[in-house]
Amino acid sequence: MKLYYTPGACSLAPHIAAREAGLALELEKVDLAKKTTDTGADYLSVNPKGYVPALRLDNGEILTEAAAVLQYLADQAPHGRLAPPQGTFERYRFVEWLTFISSELHKGFGPLWKPDTPEATRKTAIARLNERFAFLNEHFRKNSFLMGETFTAADAYLFTVLNWANFHKLDLAPFENVRAFLQRVFARPSVQEALKAEGLLRETT
């Protein structure tokens, strides 16, 4: 399988999940501004939507959208416990979390990435994100991860999106349980490996 990624983008989530599950994954970096890959390929010929992630399967199929890619990877390695079994209620709870991250957090950051966003719109977006952070902070008061005490692919997605708060200089100080969650996930070997592979973590000696 090949993952088309951009360092630190939402494609980091399936990158982490694949490493967590021990799945072999080839990486190809994408320049989202130019819509080209490191090999010089036209990325729009891979994913006409123009954004990451895109996962090229061994049979040539292309799968896009972080939530879908995460579920696919989790199901390729059920022993990894990255998602509850299909058909169980817990699986729907897992999908509920993926949907929340995608619609309420991932898209919630949208206005902050655009330099021409009016300041009033930016402040409204931050206020809404803070409401979501407060919700998560309460959840992590009693849970180590989204699904309780078990790390899942949803946590990889949440970790990736929450880290955008640092880029945009959002204050997470009031959300101590969210910060503790980020520290727990950051410490995982799979996360360290993915960050290093994407050039987001300096090698230590």
Image (cartoon, helix red, strand yellow):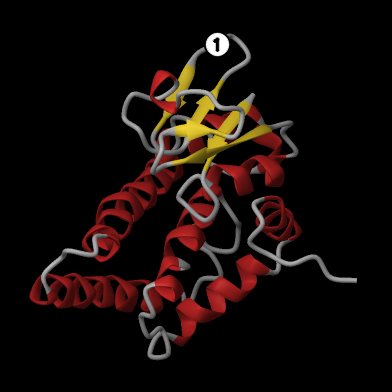
Q: Position of residue 92 (x, y in %)?
A: 37, 41
Q: Residue at x 41, y 38 (%)?
A: 34
- Which quadrant of the view contains residue 81? top right
Q: Residue at x 58, y 18 (%)?
A: 57
Q: Residue at x 72, y 60 (%)?
A: 192
Q: Residues within 10 Å of mark 1 (few under 14, many from 20)?
A: few
Q: Does 177 appear above or below 33?
A: below
Q: Quadrant of the N terminus?
A: top right
Q: Position of residue 161 (x, y in %)?
A: 43, 60
Amino acid tagged 1: Gly
Q: Does 196 appear above or below 15?
A: below
Which residue is farthest bottom?
A: 174
Q: Quadrant of the C terminus?
A: bottom right
Left or right of residue 111: residue 200: right
Quickly name the residue at label 1: 60
- Which quadrant of the view contains residue 170? bottom left
Q: Position of residue 204 (x, y in %)?
A: 84, 70
| Foreground of the two, 187 or 64 | 64
Question: Does the image show residue 146?
Answer: no
Q: Residue at x 45, y 45 (%)?
A: 90
- Which quadrant of the view contains residue 151? bottom right
| Foreground of the two, 182 or 92 | 182
Left or right of residue 18: residue 66: left
Q: Does 173 appear above or below 100?
A: below
Question: Does the image show residue 66?
Answer: yes
* Secondary structure at numbered mark 1: loop
- Please tell me how many numbered marks the rendered image carries: 1
Which residue is farthest right?
A: 205
